[in-house]
Amino acid sequence: MKLSVIIPVYNSESTIALLVDKLQQALQGILFEIVMINDGSQDNSERICKQLAKQFPNVRFLSLRRNYGEFNAVMCGLNWVQGEFCVMIDDDFQNPPEEILKLLETAEKGDYDVVYTHYSKKQHAAYRNLGSRLVNWFTGYSLNKPKGLYLSSFKLIRKEVVLEIIKYQGPYPYIDGLIFRITRNIGSVQVMHEKREAGVSNYTWRKLISLVLNILFCYSSLPIRLFMPIGVGLFGFGFVLLLFLFGQWVIGPDPKGWQVVTASLIFIGGIQCTLLSVLGEYIGKSFMAQSGQPQYVVKFNSGADR
């Protein structure tokens, strides 16, 4: 098998059949498979995907019991692919299926483990473009991402890297974070970006904040490193302030007791609350990771018999 195409499906009844048809046309001459994962859609996506799995022998369909999120759905798909290369593509047609050939050609020519895509002009809404820039800026610091690399959801991964990624069993998968843990042999290629065919984007600020917190507390030690200089700075400032009050007590006029107590409580309490909140996030994530909470639960599996 040369290529596996993973499609996370969510409320895509109007586009998924056409996308599969276009993939069949665009990838003629390549031995490939399509793995669709229904991430708890509320429309008729599951029924349509079942029909597609029966219609095409190279299509596998898995349906999850509820909405677990895009990364979890992709992780589910990665566990079933058997292609030499794996491509992830959204179900909204903003990435034309024909562009997959560019990723494959770039990976083979450059012998890359991973190939990301970037766009000359993005067709997302302004708020989503802003959110994407914020995430890319943030990951540059927290994950030590190569400078200038755009982390798109439309990307190609070599099978050897896929086998390492799926070793992660925690409930909070972040594909890009796992990639940077495994390899730095990464390429990039410019592709077309089209307007959304139908429906509305499921990208929200709530999901953006959730993603940032996931990166921050599951894939980076940045909070500990960040709060260390803050804690030292507050400690130093508090020490200087108390030293100043002590000087007043020696030279006069005497500082009021409530000033000393209030200043001490504010600084010590602030440091404690900050460190406890960071510690609580790490403990909470660690607890959930060890609690046995699954990344996903498959309800239905059909097509592309192994």
Image (cartoon, rainbow, N blue to C red):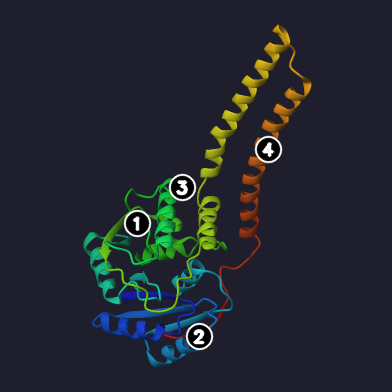
Q: Amino acid at mark 4?
A: Gln
From this viewpoint, which residue is outermost toward the right? Answer: 257
Q: Decide: marks 3, 4 in contact (CB < 8 A)?
A: no
Where is residue 61 drawn, in percent x and y? Answer: 46, 83
Q: Quadrant of the C terminus?
A: bottom left
Where is residue 29 drawn, in percent x and y? Answer: 23, 82
Q: Is residue 300 above or below residue 225?
A: below
Question: Pointer 3: what residue?
Answer: 142
Classify 10 Å Cα crowding around label 2: few (below 14), some (14-19), many (20 and above): many
Q: Is residue 266 above or below residue 299?
A: above
Q: Secondary structure at mark 4?
A: helix
Disc number for residue 46? 2
Q: Decide: marks 1, 2 in contact (CB < 8 A)?
A: no
Q: Amino acid at mark 1?
A: Tyr
Q: Secondary structure at mark 3?
A: helix
Where is residue 191 drawn, in percent x and y? Answer: 27, 66
From this viewpoint, which residue is outermost toward the left? Answer: 109
Which mark is first along the chain, 4 or 3? 3
Classify 10 Å Cα crowding around label 1: few (below 14), some (14-19), many (20 and above): some
Disc number for residue 272? 4
- Occupied quadrant, residue 55: bottom left
The residues bearing labels 1 and 2 have C-alpha atoms spaced at a distance of 32 Å
Which mark is first along the chain, 2 or 4? 2
Q: Decide: marks 4, 1 in contact (CB < 8 A)?
A: no
Q: Secondary structure at mark 1?
A: loop
Classify 10 Å Cα crowding around label 3: few (below 14), some (14-19), many (20 and above): some
Disc number for residue 150? 1
Q: Quadrant of the N terminus?
A: bottom left
The reply to whether residue 145 is visible in this rendering is: yes
Q: Amino acid at mark 3?
A: Ser
Classify 10 Å Cα crowding around label 4: few (below 14), some (14-19), many (20 and above): few
Q: Secondary structure at mark 2?
A: helix
